Image: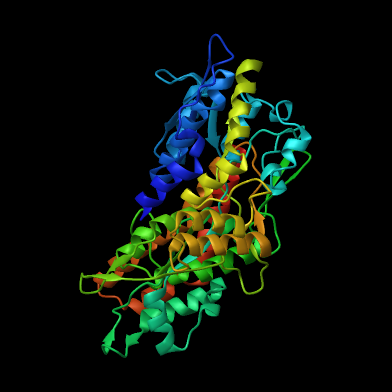
C-alpha cells in the first residue's frame, strides 16, 4: 500500500517533475547547494523526489543545483553539524541548508554561522505561513528569523483498537477513559489484571501503554499544569519543574512502570505494539506510518488489528496542550548569492503544491495557511484513491488537525545548553525506572515479597531521592 501511494505521489503530486524541462540555466556556473536532513524511509524518498523536481524545473531555470544527504536520525545529524561548525578533523564543510531543532541552532547562532532569514523572506511571504510555526524560529537576541518550518508534527495517542475494544467491552471502559494521564494509568492497571472472559485466560500481567518522548512528557505536562518549564528574564534562564508537578508525573509514569502496567522494551513504542508488548503508545503523528497491520499474539501468532488514534492526553486538572515539533530548516552563513539560492529552494519547497505532497506522504503537517486544513489534506489523499478512515495515517491526520484546532501547540524555549538539559529530561526518570526494576528483580530473587519491594520503590522517600538527584543534574547542566 505504501509503495503504491508513493508511486502515485511521484507521478501526480509532482507532475512537473515527470517531464524534462527545456528551460535553460540563467547562470553560467550553477550555484551548488547541499542540504542535510534526518528523514528516513518514505519521508526520505519523497524529499529526494522533491529535490530532483526542483533541480529539473526552478533550479534549472535559475542556475541552482541541490544535493540532499540523509543522516540516520536527529542525533547523528546534529553531531555532524557540530563537527562541521567546530572544524573537527575529518568533518565535512557546513552544508548550505540543514534540518535542526532550535536547541542545537542556538550555539551556532552565537558563533555567527547562521543566516538571517528576514533578509530573504518578505513580511508578506512570511504571513503566508502558520504564525506559531514561524515564531518558533525567532529565538535570537534581536528576534530575527533563524529557522524556517517546512513540515511540523505533534504527538498523539495510538491504540490497538482490536485489543482495546475487546477489553473495554468486558471491563466497562471507553475511549474517554484515555483522555487523561490518570485515566491511562487506571486503564493500564485494569488491563494488567484482566482475565479475558472469552478464553478464561488471564492476560498474564500484560502492559498496556508506552511513550516515545519522555522529555516531551515532562515539558508538555508542566505546561498543561500552567507552568512554562523554562522562562527567560534579563538573559537569565529559570527552570520551573516544581516538586508538586514532578510528583504528578511520578504517579502516572514511574509507578505504572514499576508495577508492570507500562513498558518500553524496543527502540520505538510502535515496535513494542507490533511485538504484542503494549496495546497503546504516545508517539509522533509521523509514526503512524509504522503502525502495524498485524501484531504478535500471546501464542506467537500474527493477528490482524485495527488502529484508533486520540488526541494527546492531559492531566485531569490540566489544560489541553500538545507538543509542536519537527526540525525546521536552517541556512548556513555563506555568500549572499548562496544564501539567496538556499532561500529560493525553501520557498519552492513550502509552496502548497509541493508541501502538501510531502505532508501527505510523511504524516507531517504542511506549514502554509492555505493548505493547513484537514479537508485540503484529505482531498490530496482522496486523489490517491486509498482513503479509508481505518488507515492509521488517515486516523492520525484527523487527530492532528483536531489538536491544531482545539489544543495549544507548544514548544519550549531554546537557550544555550538547552539540548543538554533536554537530555536530562529525556533520561532521568527512565534511567531511574530501569535501575529500580533491576533492584525489584534482585530483591524478589533473594526471597523478598514482590508487593513489599514494590511499596518500597514507589514510596515518598524514593520519590524524594529521585527528585533531589534530578534537580542536581539540572543545576549542574545550567552551571556547566
Horizontal relation, residue 415 to residue 207: left or right: right
Task: Please name the residue shown 69% across and 42% down the image.
Answer: 134
Horizontal relation, residue 436 to residue 230: left or right: left
Horizontal relation, residue 328 to residue 265: left or right: right
Where is residue 64 shown, x and y percent of the image? 55, 20
Q: Quadrant of the N terminus?
A: bottom left
Where is residue 85 shown, x and y percent of the image? 53, 23
**Up/down of 128 relative to 35, above or below:** below
**Up/down of 249 relative to 266, above or below:** below
Task: Please name the residue shown 62% across and 27% down the image.
Answer: 344
Where is residue 116 shown, x and y percent of the image? 69, 27
Colour convention: rainbow
Horizontal relation, residue 122 to residue 225: left or right: right
Residue 298 visible within the image? yes
Residue 242 visible within the image? no
**Up/down of 160 relative to 288, above or below:** below
Question: In terms of image quadrants, where is residue 275?
Answer: bottom left
Q: Pick the residue in front: 147 or 120.
A: 120
Q: Pick the residue in front: 59 or 163.
A: 59
Question: In terms of image quadrants, where is residue 63?
Answer: top right
Where is residue 261 shown, x and y percent of the image? 40, 73
Q: Pick the residue in front: 220 or 62.
A: 62
**Up/down of 18 relative to 474, above or below:** above
Furthest residue toward top: 28
Total label count? 0
Q: Quadrant of the C terminus?
A: top right
Task: Please name the residue shown 36% across and 53% down the image.
Answer: 267
Question: In terms of image quadrants, where is residue 145?
Answer: top right
Q: Pick the residue in front: 323 or 36.
A: 36
Amino acid at each position: 500500500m505504501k509503495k503504491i501511494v508513493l508511486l502515485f505521489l511521484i507521478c501526480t503530486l509532482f507532475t512537473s517533475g515527470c517531464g524534462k524541462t527545456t528551460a535553460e540555466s540563467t547562470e553560467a556556473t550553477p550555484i551548488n547547494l547541499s542540504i542535510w536532513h534526518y528523514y528516513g524511509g518514505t519521508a526520505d524518498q519523497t524529499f529526494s523526489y522533491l529535490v530532483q523536481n526542483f533541480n529539473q524545473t526552478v533550479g534549472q531555470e535559475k542556475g541552482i543545483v541541490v544535493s540532499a544527504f540523509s543522516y540516520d536520525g536527529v542525533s547523528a545529524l546534529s553531531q555532524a553539524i557540530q563537527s562541521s561548525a567546530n572544524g573537527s578533523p575529518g568533518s565535512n564543510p557546513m552544508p548550505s541548508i540543514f534540518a535542526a531543532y532550535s536547541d542545537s541552532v542556538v550555539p551556532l547562532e552565537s558563533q555567527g554561522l547562521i543566516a538571517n532569514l528576514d533578509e530573504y523572506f518578505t513580511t508578506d511571504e512570511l504571513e503566508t505561513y502558520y504564525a506559531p510555526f514561524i515564531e518558533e524560529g525567532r529565538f535570537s537576541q534581536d528576534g530575527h528569523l533563524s529557522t524556517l518550518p517546512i513540515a511540523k508534527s505533534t504527538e498523539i495517542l495510538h491504540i490497538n483498537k482490536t485489543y482495546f475494544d475487546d477489553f473495554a467491552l468486558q471491563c466497562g471502559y471507553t475511549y474517554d477513559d484515555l483522555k487523561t494521564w490518570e485515566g491511562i494509568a487506571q486503564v493500564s492497571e485494569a488491563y494488567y489484571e484482566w482475565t479475558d472472559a472469552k478464553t478464561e485466560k488471564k492476560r498474564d500481567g500484560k502492559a498496556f501503554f508506552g511513550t516515545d518522548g519522555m522529555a516531551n512528557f515532562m515539558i508538555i505536562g508542566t505546561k498543561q499544569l500552567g507552568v512554562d518549564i523554562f522562562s527567560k528574564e534579563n538573559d537569565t534562564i529559570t527552570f520551573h519543574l516544581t516538586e508538586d508537578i514532578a510528583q504528578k508525573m511520578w504517579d502516572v509514569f514511574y509507578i505504572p512502570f514499576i508495577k508492570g502496567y507500562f513498558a518500553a522494551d524496543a527502540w520505538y513504542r510502535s515496535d513494542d505494539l507490533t511485538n504484542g508488548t503494549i496495546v497503546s503508545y504516545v508517539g509522533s503523528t509521523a509514526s503512524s506510518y509504522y503502525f502495524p497491520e498485524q501484531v504478535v499474539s500471546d501464542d506467537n501468532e500474527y493477528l490482524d488489528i485495527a488502529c484508533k488514534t486520540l488526541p494527546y492526553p492531559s492531566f485531569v486538572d490540566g489544560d489541553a496542550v500538545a507538543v509542536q515539533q519537527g526540525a525546521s530548516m536552517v541556512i548556513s552563513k555563506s555568500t549572499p548569492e548562496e544564501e539567496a539560492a538556499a532561500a529560493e529552494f525553501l520557498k519552492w519547497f513550502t509552496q502548497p503544491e509541493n508541501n502538501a505532497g510531502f505532508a501527505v506522504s510523511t504524516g507531517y503537517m504542511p506549514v502554509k495557511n492555505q493548505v493547513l486544513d484537514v479537508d485540503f489534506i484529505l482531498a490530496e489523499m482522496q486523489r490517491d484513491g486509498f482513503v479509508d478512515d481505518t488507515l492509521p495515517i488517515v486516523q492520525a491526520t484527523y487527530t492532528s488537525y483536531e489538536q491544531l484546532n482545539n489544543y495549544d501547540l507548544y514548544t519550549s524555549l531554546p537557550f544555550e545548553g538547552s539540548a543538554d538539559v533536554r537530555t536530562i529530561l529525556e533520561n532521568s526518570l527512565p534511567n531511574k525506572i530501569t535501575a529500580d526494576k533491576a533492584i525489584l528483580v534482585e530483591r524478589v530473587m533473594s526471597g523478598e515479597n514482590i508487593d513489599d519491594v514494590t511499596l518500597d520503590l514507589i514510596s515518598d522517600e524514593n520519590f524524594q531521592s529521585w527528585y533531589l538527584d534530578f534537580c542536581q543534574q539540572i543545576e549542574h547542566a545550567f552551571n556547566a
